[in-house]
Amino acid sequence: MKPQRMALTHDLVMCYGLHERLQMFEPRLATEEEMKQFHISDYIDFLRYVTPHNMHAFKDQLQEYNVGDDCPIFEGLYKFCRISSGGSIEAARKINRGESDIAINWSGGLHHAKKVEASGFCYVNDIVLAIMELLRYHQRVVYIDIDVHHGDGVQDAFYMTNRVLTVSFHRFGPTSDGHDFFPGTGSLDQHGEDEGKYHAVNVPLKAGMDDTSYVALFKQVIDRVMEVYRPGAIVMQCGADSLGCDRLGCFCLSIKGHGQCVAHMKRHNVPMVVLGGGGYTVPNVARCWAYETGLLVDADLPNKIPPHASASFYRPDFTLFPKIQDQLRNENSQDDIARIRTAVFEQLQHLEHAPSVQMHAIPPEIDGLTEDGWAEYRDKLADQQADLDARVRLGVIAAARPQTQAAARYAENEFYTDEADQDDDFDGMDVEDDEDDGRAMDVDMNGAPGGQGRARARESSTASDAVFGWADLAGLQDNHLPTHPHAPAGGGAHLGMSGQ
Ligand SMILES: [Zn+2]
């Protein structure tokens, strides 16, 4: 979880010239109130006040909140949480306001954090906060997780609602040392409860999963999910520890194989927030996320990495696609995979003809969404865009179309009346309340008629319509951030290429 991952990704994106196809911007930090939308107040207060110097005074809380060993206290922890969460929340808002079809925050994706505790180096769950934001405008949201670890924190948060369907592809089961692979959850039979029954989809896999098996299964499962659930928005966690040669992972995906999953979701043409996640062989994480940024803006990146300040990390061959697969035997037999696919399809049958869920509780208004606040914020973003140069370090990178085009496209889509249109699905939305609290006026200012701000771009996705982001980590020095607690000692960058 070193900020070096973000810096390297940033440098690759820039050296490939992808910034020319992106809108890049720096979101404000998440506020305390925003983070408390999901996490309990005392836990956020604890994160705010605890430091390496005073942690001895928080002995009880350290234990209660699972902070200390796997989730250490470090200088700048609270800001780290605010950066990561602020980027994901803002990405969701870009989608909600119809300003972008795809919004990327590579510093997000911290899927293990729970409502009342930290887990697996995740303290604040930016994904849950982003999904809560999307639920203001979208009746159904699909969450997709291709990190090698189970997306337990997100699944838990929405385990009892039918408004979010979570899908996690992950390693599951005992490892060679006899312990369950972290976090130990995500079996096939965990599929949701109450209203959320059948809305948690788990794809538990063994070690060595390769491109051929993984991508085929991913497409089959996801296409079925999209067909039966018909979400208004997608959140995709792109943890890169499912790549081959990851220091913690045990899958054998290539960078192109990992990217095929992202590209496949783009083809579904549903507004999407794309987030980072795990990934512990740092140069490969940067390769992967830069490549996937390119896929999202339809850029064809050459294998030879252009010369740039961080090029030495990609020695010896300076390629974007090193051979990192085929390092482990695939322990998943075709029978294993067929059994999983059958079980998931049977689960999804329960959702058929049942996606007409009504809007229930819309998350309460989040601080900073007043009309004046948005106007001020938009002005700031406009200034930042004007000042953008090749070395800017950003909070949320953006691959968005110009706002004016987005507004025009949005207006066109508002009248989308194909049979796949889900206008009827919004009948249950409490639009009147939205207008009362002033948000509708904010959306109107973006050119969205009706004040509902629903971004639906199914028929009009273009090459450069993503919003793309990562955090300004200038205030966080590498030596303040520990490596992932499960990482082998020693840190440092490993190329993870075959034969090394
Ligand atoms: Zn992971």
Image (cartoon, rainbow, N blue to C red):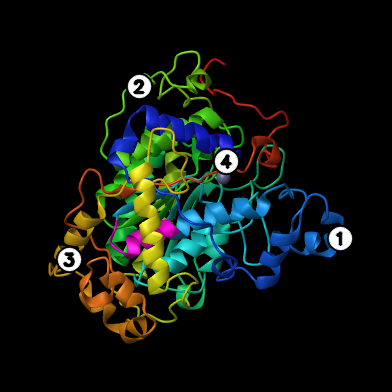
Residue 72: x and y in percent read 74, 48
Which of pointers 4 and 2 indicates the residue nearer the eye? Answer: 4
**Element carrying mark 1:** helix
User: Label 1 sits on what residue type?
Assistant: Ala
The residue pinned by badge 2 equals 303
Of residues 202 and 347, which is closer to you in this image?
A: 202
Q: Is residue 208 above or below residue 185?
A: above
| Mark with earlier residue (4, 2) | 2
| Mark with earlier residue (2, 3) | 2
Q: Can you tell which mark lies on residue 449?
A: none
The residue pinned by badge 3 equals 411
User: Label 2 sits on what residue type?
Assistant: Asn
Residue 219: x and y in percent read 33, 47
| Mark with earlier residue (3, 4) | 3
Identify the image quadrant of the N terminus.
top right
**Element carrying mark 4:** loop
Label 1 Cα crowd, 10 Å radius (few <14 / some 14-19 / many 20+): few
Q: How far, Cα to Cα, is label 2 from label 3?
A: 39 Å
Q: How far, Cα to Cα, is label 3 from label 1?
A: 55 Å
The stretch of residues the image draws in magenta is: 90-99
Disc 4 to disc 2: CB gap under 8 Å: no
For the point 54% across and 42% down, the residue is 206
Splitting the image into four quadrants, where does ligand 1 fall?
top right
For the point 74% across and 50% down, the residue is 73
Q: Quadrant of residue 227?
A: bottom left
The residue pinned by badge 4 equals 474
